[in-house]
Image: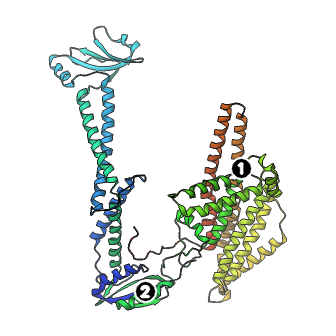
Amino acid sequence: MIEPMKKVTLLAGASWEDEILNALRETGIFHIRLPENAGAPDVTIKKDVTVENRLGNNMLLIQEALGLIPQAVKAKPCKGDEDGIVLARELCSKTKEAFSLEAQIQELEKAYEDQKIWGQFDPHDIEQLKDHSIFIRLFKARKKELGQLPADIARVVIHTRGAMAYFAVVTCHEPLCPIPFHEISMPEQSLSHLARMLEQKREALETIQKRILELYGAAPYMARSLNECKALLAYENARNAMVRRGDIIYLQGYCPTCFTGKLKERADIEKWGIVIENPGPEETVPSLVRYSKLTHLFRPVMAFIGVLPGYREYDANGPFLFFFTLFFAMIIGDAGYGVMILAATFFHAKRSAAPHKDLIPLLYLLSLSTMVWGALTGSWFGVEALRNFPLFKAMIIPSMDTFSDTSQPFIIHLCFLIGAVQLSFAHCRRILNTFPHIRFLAETGWFFLIWAIYFIVRVLVLNQPFSPLGYYCLIAALCLIICFGQQKEDGFFKGLARSVVRLPLDIITWIGNLSDLVSYVRLFAVGMSTKEVAVAFNNMAFNIGFDTLPAMFSAVLVLLGGHSVNLLLGAMAILVHGIRLNVLEFSKHLNIEWSGVPYDPFREPEP
């Protein structure tokens, strides 16, 4: 559920600015609201943009430095007063310098390898020979082409590599005669000079890399400085939200209803004035989602998506969890894969330092649901022979048998039925939200429209006869939506006229609802593709055979690699399709726009 909020206004003397902020930071329950239309510019406490910019830049610098430190590096604990900002700046600087040196070393190594062909000589000496009318040029050509050189041109073959020859041409006149081979520019540095430069760069890089490794251990100091910057920036933002009216300052914000008593007690102790009221209908109120023990399972998925319902929107975590679990089972669709996920989750949970511990309960639920669905459809790693085991065969529902062609219409029908149930549940919630306003009848019409569309889809996709119940649902939907969809407080007939005018737009919405329901067929399509890919890899392995050791080894590799890839593709399909049906289609019918602002109380930053 979304925690109810109260709008709170705190008033105190103008000289109590720091005392108010320090006390609020200690309580850690007050979400500060930025002032809107506070009045003339001089009524708001002066904003120190320089401090904010400096703190923001320091935070970006530290975050960049922490991003350079590998996760595997074990950092020492903070035992001194070293400045994490200085250390972060040095780490970023040294890292950029190391990258620059590595690029220079690569260029020098390439130049050294290219020049090594010509041996050791000083290009300066070549330049001096020009004063004595001796001109040396460097070329490369195929060995068999060397005979094409004129006889009066002196050449010296310096190096050969495969079919290529690298040679120098010596002439005693200018302008230089054209030679029909690829000419190589004369090096600017000698080979020994390049070697010395390489050695110097490598030594400098080694020194910098040692310092970078030392700075990796300073991560706790950087993290501490980052928290200090966050605390200072939060303090500045809170101070900037205060508004001055003469000798009085006030600060507005929001507090969960369950914490208002605690805030009133603190206000009494600090001698503040306090006003607690309900938020206005147009105010942007922060959302604090309270998870139950069951819906808490779905929290990692919502955190991954990064969406939050608005304060006045419906918290759909419960329905999301139920339908997402069902979608996951249908998309993966194989009991063997469910066993693999269950085993991987079990061994992952046994690790004492296993990351993402909050995912473990959800993965258990998803793996078990996949095993149940796979057992009911008779799919075990896509191997048809496994389904014939007595225990596995006893669990199969014949109309859902994935290896039976006659089961496909039933599964498609089941997908449409699941979609109709989910979307109609959304309209049931909207009926409850609008009751007792007369518009709840229009929401009832949309509920009936979903089921009318369900019967229409059965005709269009499955060639089933149109049910008489569908006629009743369609007539009820049209009457209720047209008669009550635009009703306000200005009379029934004006509302009816607005509905008639809006009818073309409503027709587009009806078509959209048809598309939403049809989109649930993706559960069948993706689940079927998962099964077919598994069968394809199984056939490849069986065609290779298990007669000889090399064949067995190859077949096992095909099975392990193929099923791993298939499971990975299934996981990607969950992200694309399973989440989409909840966050887009279902949420649209619930009228959830995910416009929520997270509840972020003014408090000390977490370490």
What type is the residue that disc 2 sits on? Leu
Which mark, by number, is residue 531?
A: 1
- In the depicted structure, whether residue 296 falls above or below residue 127: below
What type is the residue that disc 1 sits on? Lys
Q: Tell me which residue sits at (62%, 43%) in the image.
A: 561
Q: Tell me which residue sits at (73%, 48%) in the image.
A: 382
Image quarter in which the N terminus is found: bottom right
Q: Is residue 485 visible?
A: yes
Q: In the image, is 272 to the left or to the right of 515?
A: left
Q: Secondary structure at mark 2?
A: helix
Q: Which quadrant of the view contains residue 437?
A: bottom right
- In the depicted structure, whether residue 103 falls above or below residue 298: above
Q: Tell me which residue sits at (38%, 73%) in the image.
A: 604
Which mark, by number, is residue 335?
A: none
**Residue 469 in picture, x, y percent from top left:** 82, 72
Q: In the image, is 202 to the left or to the right of 354?
A: left
Q: How many marks?
A: 2
- Asked if the residue at tag 2 contacts the one at tag 1, i.e. Cβ–Cβ closer than 8 Å, the answer is no
Most foreground residue, 525 or 607: 607
Q: Marks 1 and 2, how far apart in space?
A: 58 Å
Q: Which residue is mark 2?
A: 263
Most foreground residue, 154 or 30: 30
- How crowded is the residue under tag 2: few (<14 C-alpha within 10 Å), some, or many (20+)? many
Tell which tag, 1 or 2, sits nearer the viewer.
Answer: 2
**Residue 292 in picture, x, y percent from top left:** 59, 74
Q: In the image, is 476 to the left or to the right of 132?
A: right
Q: Secondary structure at mark 1?
A: helix
Image quarter in which the C terminus is found: bottom left
**Residue 425 in picture, x, y percent from top left:** 69, 73
Q: Is residue 97 visible?
A: no
